Structure formats: C-alpha cells, structure tokens
Amino acid sequence: MPPDAASLVATGPAGLDVSGVARLLIRFSEAVDGRRPADIAALFAAEGLFKPGDQAITGPAAIEAFYRARLQDPRRTTRHLWSNLTVAPSAEDGVQVRVVLTNYAFEPAVSEREVQMRLGEVSGRCVQDRNGEWLFAEHVYQRQYALRLPCNEVRP
C-alpha cells in the first residue's frame, strides 16, 4: 500500500509539493520501523547529512552502516509518528522542513520491561532527484523529551 501523505497534517506556501515531502517522511518511518537499512539510506541525497543527536553521519553508505549496527538486535522494535509538518522554500535548492517526531522504541539493551517514548523535532532540507522524488539533504533530530513507559507485553 503506498504511503498516504494525507494522513500527515502539513502546511506550506501554495505551489510547494508539501504532500511529496510528507510521503518522504512516511517512507522514512516505514523503512526504519520495517528494519530496512538500505531503504533508509536510499532516502538521502549523495551528500545527505543525518544527525540523530550528537553524531553527524554523511552519505547513504554511512547511514546504511549506522542502521545496520543499530538494528543488530532483532528484538529492537520502533514506531515513528509525524505531526505538524511545515515546509518552506529554501535559500538553496529544495525546501526547508520542520516536523514533530514521536518515536516509540522497545530496546532490550535499554530495558526489558519498558518502552521508550521520545518526542523531538526534525529539521532540515529536502531536495528532489532527477525523477522528482524528494530526498533528505539534511535530517537533524533534536530530542525534547524522553519517557519510559511500562511494557505490558513480555518480550521473548
């Protein structure tokens, strides 16, 4: 089933492809939650910057390697939810993006009995490839809150 960008509330000036950027965010979360490092990396431009905290990772190959390492534990599961997307023209090519990300993660290395909920903001810039598909030129995540929630389900 193709991603449904209409499910993401978004704003931006008339004429910008806001729904295309929303589809990029949804494809990103589906690839991360689906544990597909190559698909995650493919959503970044050749010199795309991914900054999930203090670490800066540049380029699809390095991003794929980051996610391969991060997803080594098969029990680690996540769910990413986007809201309040704002898209604006960029001084460079592409568009500036700001969006709220709520992320739920079961990470056994952190806790066997709790799910982590993180709320933060992703900001950055998106560019279109030669086929008109949006890619991340810059994807910077800044966490604002982190909570631990009891896990009612016992995980193997």
Image (spheres, helix red, strand yellow):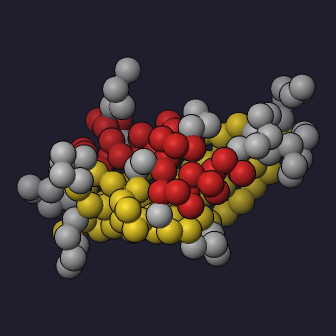
Q: Residue at position x 66%, y 40% from top? A: 78
Q: Residue at position x 41%, y 65% from top? A: 48
Q: Position of residue 86 (x, y in %)?
A: 31, 60
Q: Position of residue 35 (x, y in %)?
A: 61, 37
Given the current orientation, which residue lies at the most extreme bottom position?
91
Q: Position of residue 84 (x, y in %)?
A: 39, 54
Quadrant in the picture for the C terminus: top right
Taking 86 as reference, is 27 above or below it? above
Q: Position of residue 32 (x, y in %)?
A: 56, 42
- Asked if residue 98 shows in the view, the reply is no
Q: Is residue 140 left or right of residue 89?
A: right
Taking 73 as reference, is 137 above or below it? below
Q: Is residue 77 left or right of residue 128?
A: right
Splitting the image into 4 quarters, where does residue 112 fall?
top right
Taking 81 as reference, is 99 above or below it? below
Residue in the foreground of this view, choosing between 111 and 39: 39
Residue in the foreground of this view, choosing between 153 and 63: 63
Given the current orientation, which residue lies at the most extreme left position?
15
Quadrant in the picture for the N terminus: top left
Q: Residue at position x 40%, y 50% from top? A: 43
Q: Looking at the image, how many numbered discs can be counted on the residues?
A: 0
Q: Residue at position x 57%, y 73% from top? A: 56
Given the current orientation, which residue lies at the most extreme front position?
61
Splitting the image into 4 quarters, where does residue 142 fall?
bottom right
- Asked if residue 69 shows in the view, the reply is yes
